[in-house]
Amino acid sequence: MNPSSRRGPKGAYSVIADEQLNRLEASDPLLYNDLVTICEEIFLHPDRAQSQSAAVRTADGIVLRYAVPGRYPYKVFWRRSDLRIEAVFPYP
């Protein structure tokens, strides 16, 4: 899927997240769909998503880590401050 056709506010996906999602779309479309669904839920319901996320402190500030149901160990890493998906990858 073209990154511009993913749902979310303008600039909602980092370059890293776009690249990761593009690779997953080509290699595992079902996993890709599950991840994009979670990303869309984060954009639609950020308060609920934040309550279901763990906070991770980084050198660049706080990033939230949302576990993808049924897809362990995949996580969506996102920022509440600018409602942006930073990365998606397996993380224990």
Image (cartoon, rainbow, N blue to C red):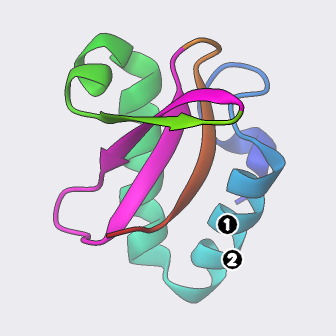
Local packing at callout 1 (Cα closer than 10 Å; few below 14, some 14-19, many 20+) is some
Tell me which amino acid carries mark 2.
Answer: Arg
Q: Is residue 34 left or right of residue 89?
A: left
Q: CA distance from mark 2 to mark 1?
A: 5 Å
Q: Residue at x 54, y 58 (%)?
A: 88
The answer to whether the residue labelled 2 contacts the one labelled 1, judged by CB atoms less than 8 Å apart, is yes
Q: Is residue 65 left or right of residue 28?
A: left
Image spot of residue 9 (x, y percent) = 67, 19
Which structural element holds mark 2? helix
Tell me which amino acid carries mark 1.
Answer: Gln
Image spot of residue 56 (x, y percent) = 44, 38
Q: Residue at x 24, y 71 (%)?
A: 72
Q: Residue at x 40, y 68 (%)?
A: 91
The residue closer to the viewer here, 36 or 63, is 63
> From the viewer's perspective, is residue 82 above or below residue 42?
above
Q: Residue at x 23, y 18 (%)?
A: 48
Looking at the rendering, in which quadrant would you find the C terminus? Answer: bottom left
Image spot of residue 15 (x, y percent) = 83, 49
Q: Which residues are magenta?
A: 60-80
Which residue is label 2 attached to? 23
Per the rendering, the mark at residue 20 is 1
